[in-house]
Amino acid sequence: MAKLGFVPHVGIPRNSCSRADHDCEQQRQPSIVCFRSSLNGQSCSSSSCGFFGVPCRFSRVNKFVVKDPQWNNNIVASQELQSNGNVADKSPRSRSAGLVGTKPGAPDWSKRAAARSMLRAIQFKDEDFAKPIITLASTYTNATPCNAHMDRLGDKLLATIESLGAKGFIFGTPVISDGETMGTSGMRYSLVSRDLIADCIECMHEGYLADGLLTLGGCDKSIPGAVMPILRTNAYGVFLYGGSIQPGKLNGQDLTVISTFEAIGSYSSGKIDEETLKRIEQNACPGPGSCGGMYTANTMASVIEAMGLSVPYSASHTAMTEDNQLSPEKLRDCEESVKALFTCMEKNIRARDICTKKAFENGITVMMALGGSTNGVLHLLALAHEAQVDLDIEDFHRIGQRVPLLGDFKPFGRYVMADLDKIGGIPMVMKYLWKQGLIHGDCMTVTGQRIEEWLVNAPDLPPMEEKKNATHGAVIRPVEYALAPAGNHIVIMRGNLAPQGAVIKLSGKELEVHRGPARVFDSEEEALDAILAGKIVKNDVVVIRYEGPKGGPGMREMLSPSSAIMGSGLGKDVALITDGRFSGGTHGIMVGHITPEAAVGGPIALVEEGDIICLEPKKRLMTLQVDEAELERRRKQWKPVNKCPPQGLLKKYARIVSSASKGAITDEEGESDGREPLGIWPRSS
């Protein structure tokens, strides 16, 4: 793709060319002066002359150069076009002029002198005030491998932005590692951080009146958190995934961090010794990058690429090479992401032009085919809210009913994201699904092309005979050899225990019925202690409640207890249900996101020790086998468990967060059981 440069510019009439000396068909109105005429030498700032797709010989641009810092002739042209109402919103600098001023001599120029004075302190020159400003959210922290390399990716993105003629404002956000905080009170801040990240990015982008937005994400919540503000502000925006970690290796087997979580359960049940546990701990995570299986990070990266808001192939490119160097593919993703952003700005392609209802359906289709995380349900509902797309929890059931499970990925399968990258990544998967009639090909992407346009050149699914070797294995299977038929991955459950919905990840498991006595715990820690102490036995239904968005607060992931169940060898015999969440690494008989949650008086709050609970995934039912009269008696006697701190972020979050069935969003009225006070503490507190 040609390098793109920008100048203060509002667009070119359809029958005009950007230079009087062009030899292209669009050269019709040389009397109209546009800002592109200030480019030096034999350069044009568009890969298509005149904005409208007619190639010309000047379409290769090195960078933006302003010959005359006063920009006088060009500004006149800009004002004329704006006064005529011609595509003013296509200006690459339509917003940031409000920060730095329009031009020398303009009415707003002197008013913005103080802002320019401060920007000069960070090396802005006269000509830089004519350039578009790009906000760059680099979710870097050295606290987790998922985001430990984001500083280098951020530096690469910033350098590319400036080399192509814009100015970048780079900044950081909070990042909470699910894997590290799992099973602790710190995990309460994980889902909270998703919306906090989104708010931080919105604050920077809107505060500095930026023209475009680039965001980086790695650890689970930093991905939807980095996409939500792009959709919320309907920005010219592109998301870039930091990349998956390389698999760990031990005794010829691939490891991920989930291997360590499950090893804890195996150790507690005497299946492995302490030395084996330590070796798994030491080898599971070899370097930077997000968890390697089809857990939440890789699920969301795949979904966002499928929706068109990331450049093709970027979701499967690993963060590092096998010798732990920053991968050249990820560095190339940085360059392509900046170019894609500039394409969106030139072609006036905003985030909501890309993330339509059809695009969300494409994302859900890919999630179901790959065997993605249940957290995808929660995050996609939140993203749809930001995009003002009408998406409901039942849409996941509707789409799931036609999409078979094709990806053989950890935690339930054999492969990791790096294996998918070797055979063509997400474009290969989408091309296959497109040929099966499961993908909408007419959706726009950040490349400026529709999905069907760039899928034409995507790799094909490797033929079955190639799947006999270790590399091509059965990473992605054809429909006729699917791991499970449609409707057998993520299933939306209902019933008297979850009247507003719940989520189970079957991942192809043949589970007709699980029926057993309830083992009730009001916190994750209590449940984990019981599991590790051997108090949970075959047929039990472990109930972990008051862990929802309000009740936690923060809707923690139950990976520690679920992994302990799996590691103890009870994965096929014990169910776990919760109003909290599960990690993308969770597998087994696990039902999460039960709504209404316990903290607002949902039915899960009424369950007592020994009650019989029946799970019927084929019927999409979860039933508390207690008669209605008894449930009504319990309901009248119910008193909520108050876990909310007296002040701080968690208290604010618990007050405003919505139900998990709506994506646990924080900018609409939270759910209530109709009582005063709302949920779990006095309104005056």
Image (cartoon, rainbow, N blue to C red):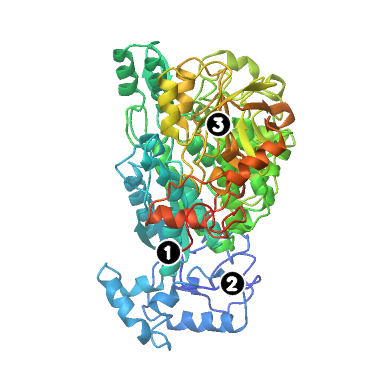
Q: Which residue is mark 2?
A: 12
Q: Position of residue 226 (x, y in %)?
A: 47, 51
* Amino acid at dot 2: Ile
- In this view, 100 is above or below 108: above
Q: Which residue is mark 3?
A: 424
- Given residues 442 and 569, the one toward you in this image is 569
* Amino acid at dot 3: Gly
Which image quadrant is residue 606 in?
Answer: top right
Q: Residue at x 74, y 29 (%)?
A: 619
Indicate which disc residue 672 carries.
none
Q: Which residue is mark 1?
A: 203
Q: Please indicate whether residue 326 sits to the left or right of residue 364 in the image.
A: left
- Given residues 661 and 497, the one toward you in this image is 497
Q: Confirm whether residue 483 shows in the render.
A: no
Q: CA distance from mark 3 to mark 1?
A: 37 Å
Dot 1: what SS?
helix
Mark 1 neighbour class, 10 Å CA radius: few under 14, some 14 to 19, many 20 or more: few
Mark 2 neighbour class, 10 Å CA radius: few under 14, some 14 to 19, many 20 or more: many
